[in-house]
Amino acid sequence: KVDFYIDGADESNASLIVHRDFTNSGTFTHSGTAALIFAGSSNQNINTGGATLKNVEVSNSSGVTLNSQATIGGTLTLTAGNINTNGNILELTGAAADLIGGSSSSFIIATSAAGALRRHIGTNTDTYSFPVGLGSTASDFYKMDLENDNLSGMTYLDVFMVRNDGTGNNHSQYGTAH
């Protein structure tokens, strides 16, 4: 059973507000300027079924959990709550400015290379934010920014957090840049 609401008369520009889990087991085409808004009151599970999502907003203080790799081709807006990658890549293919928000109350829990935040990097002078953390509390939040100086030859960068067992301090880790 799924509860959702379409916000707008034109379906290509209408926001889809999801209050429960989101599972795509068929064909889901997400285009236009509308947002797919996760606004539940408890943790929501997301399985994209391989579909590329256009514009996504997380507005659920209990957070969302990925149950499959997720690709977002437009904006990701972090309003409230965390995204737990749960060992799945969260891939952002848009521009640097397409990640909106990212704070100690809304960030991406990415703790392994298999569950990294992947951002596509263009040849430009933009700054790419990676609001990542180790857990769901404010003290688990760390933000990394990549200040691009017309870097070329790289398609994307994977970033995740690891705990330094020797010191107990946390630090950002990145996978191979592609």
Image: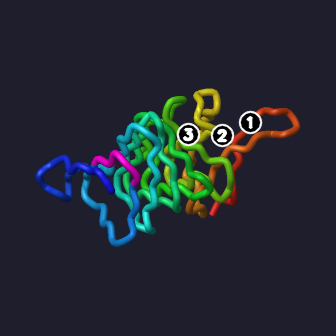
State left or right for residue 178 relative to residue 168: left
Task: Pick whichever, 99 or 18, lies toward us.
Answer: 18
Q: Would residue 166 be counted in the magenta stretch?
A: no
Q: Nearer the viewer, residue 25 or 103?
A: 25
The answer to which image quadrant residue 139 occupies is: top right
Is residue 80 depicted above or below 84 in this figure? above
Q: Which residues are magenta?
A: 17-21
Q: Position of residue 149 (x, y in %)?
A: 57, 47
Amino acid on which disc 1 is placed: Asn
- The residue lying toward the viewer, choosing from 118 and 165, is 165
Count of numbered labels shown in the rendering: 3
- Residue 117 shows up from this direction: yes
How does the figure colour the protein chain or chains? Answer: rainbow
Labels 1 and 3: the sequence-earlier one: 3
- CA gap between label 1 and label 3 equals 14 Å
Residue 18 magenta? yes
Query: Does 120 sit above or below residue 25?
Result: above
The percent position of residue 162, horizontal first and vertical second, equals: 73, 44
- Secondary structure at badge 3 equals strand
Dot 1 corresponds to which residue?
Answer: 170
Residue on which disc 2 sits? 134
Residue visible at 49% across and 35% down in the picture: 106
Q: Are marks 2 and 1 in contact (CB under 8 Å)?
A: yes
Q: Residue at x 65, y 59 (%)?
A: 114
Say which mark, if any, is on residue 131: 3
- Secondary structure, mark 1, is strand
Q: Within 10 Å of the Cα at label 3, are there few (<14), some (14-19), or many (20+) other Cα atoms? A: many
* Image quadrant where one finds the N terminus: bottom left
Q: Residues within 10 Å of mark 2 (few under 14, many from 20)?
A: many
In the rendered image, the vertical position of residue 28 relative to residue 104, given as above or below: below
Q: CA distance from mark 3 to mark 2?
A: 11 Å
Q: Which of the 4 image quarters holds residue 145?
A: top right
